Amino acid sequence: MKKYFSDIVANDTVKTRLSGDIRDSKLSHAFILEGEDGSGRHTLATSLAAAICCARNGGDTVPCKGCPSCKKIFAGKSPDIISLGITDDKATIGIDTARFIKGDIHIAPNDLPIKMYIIDDADKMTHQAQNALLLSLEEPPSYVIFVLICKDSTALLETIRSRAPIYRLEKLSYAQISDYLVGNFKKAGELLRDEPESFRELIASSSGTLGRAIALLDDKQRAKEFAERQIAKDFIELSLNRSKSKIFDMMASLGKKRPEICERLSLIQYAIRDLVMLKKSDAGELIFYSSIEEAAEISAKITLERLIDMHDAIKVASDDLRSNSNVKLTLLSMMYSCKLAD
């Protein structure tokens, strides 16, 4: 039996659906790949293109990675695999991208049987751009395939989603990430052996995404991420040992720029989510803490009501910051709403 997409870890449901469509020649002309950064969306898009074009489709593994088409696609050298996305430090994808596709779509493929447009951060397309893209999605040439990569498919117009099946890439378990890292990276095995606590923290920091876990094998990346996570832990610690004198230190550690503050507040919310979960059950999967024992000990010291109040106060602050409220006043109000001082 053929093995499809062997380079994609887990995600068996997605692989089964796509491989079945390839075998039965029932591939859609458009796909939405939804998942977190590092979840394998780009790897899957590339593998999908290679699987469709693989010259050795009769072999045991598809894509084979050895035929000329596979080699060119995986090396990123095929002119028929066109990657698009946000450019020039813009926050959104504008109508120019859709206009480019409209003008390019009728040019036949150069050396592959297909022409694939991979649109990164598709959920950041403006409504104007999405409406313009819709014209190309509705009746594309037979050789064209669209792959829309996004974190949140609900940000896409319903008219877009109705024309492209959504494939959600799953978060991987601790064991899946651990096994892959140790089996493929010497440094991972060394870290597990020499610094088991750091190895556990690395996997917890990956948020269930393999790409992020691989990136965190880099010492500098890992140190930076651990420092960010320590801010969240310090916030929880302050909630346990209330101290008015430390409130301003905590405010300073959250940063000055709105995006970085919101990212750090999100980490704190993940920590609170774990603590709330452990109030009800110890069978759930942690999304912030690397040790269930540590999280359970902290959870036992804070009431459920207070945890919920903290979570709500942080959400209000995050929303206010995104609405351009005064940073210092917003954070100070949040601190007192969270009752971080007696």
Image (cartoon, rainbow, N blue to C red):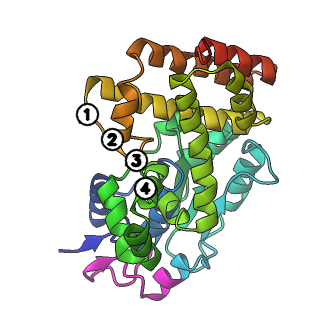
Mark-to-mark CA distance, 1 and 2: 8 Å
Predominant SS along the magenta part: loop
Assess whether residue 54 is covered by the magenta stretch: yes
Mark-to-mark CA distance, 3 and 4: 8 Å
Tell me the mark number nearer the camera, choosing from 3 and 4: 3
- Mark sitting earlier along the chain (3/4): 4
Amino acid type at image mark 4: Ile
Tag 3 residue = 290
Q: Are marks 3 and 4 in contact (CB under 8 Å)?
A: yes
Query: As drawn, is 155 to the left or to the right of 276?
Result: right
Tag 2 residue = 292
Mark-to-mark CA distance, 4 and 1: 19 Å
Residue 282 is tagged as 1
Q: Element at badge 2?
A: helix
Tag 4 residue = 203
- Mark sitting earlier along the chain (4/1): 4
Mark 1, Cα crowd under 10 Å, few <14 / some 14-19 / many 20+, is some
Q: Are marks 1 and 3 in contact (CB under 8 Å)?
A: no
Amino acid type at image mark 3: Ser
In which quadrant of the rendered image does the C terminus lie? top right
- Mark sitting earlier along the chain (1/3): 1
Query: As drawn, is 270 to the left or to the right of 228?
Result: left
Amino acid type at image mark 1: Asp
Mark-to-mark CA distance, 2 and 3: 7 Å
